[in-house]
Image (tube, helix red, strand yellow):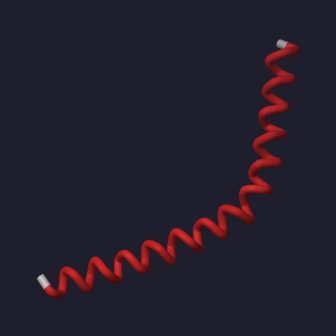
Amino acid sequence: MHTNLWVSFFEMIFCTQGCVYIHKLMKEKTKYFHRLFMKKIDGLLLVTLSG
């Protein structure tokens, strides 16, 4: 029981740190992906409208 508590405690810390890191990474990448995504959407809209 005692070891399980420690394992879950460390998992919680690891997950939190991981989430924070991923969030930072996503924040930086989101701008780039958003631009790329909007270009793709614009392209799709043009194709749809012209088609």
21 w.r.t. 27: above or below: below
What is the residue that sits farthest to the left in this orientation?
A: 1
50, 33: nearer the viewer: 33
1, 31: nearer the viewer: 1
Q: Write the residue at 50% across / 77% down.
A: 17
Q: What is the x, y in percent for residue 1? A: 11, 82
4 w.r.t. 44: above or below: below
Picture quadrant of residue 29: bottom right
Q: What is the x, y in percent for residue 19? A: 52, 69
Left or right of residue 32: residue 17: left
Left or right of residue 26: residue 32: right
Picture quadrant of residue 39: top right
Left or right of residue 34: residue 6: left
Q: Write the residue at 25% across / 85% down.
A: 6
Q: What is the x, y in percent for residue 31? A: 78, 56
10 w.r.t. 19: above or below: below
Picture quadrant of residue 44: top right
Left or right of residue 24: residue 3: left
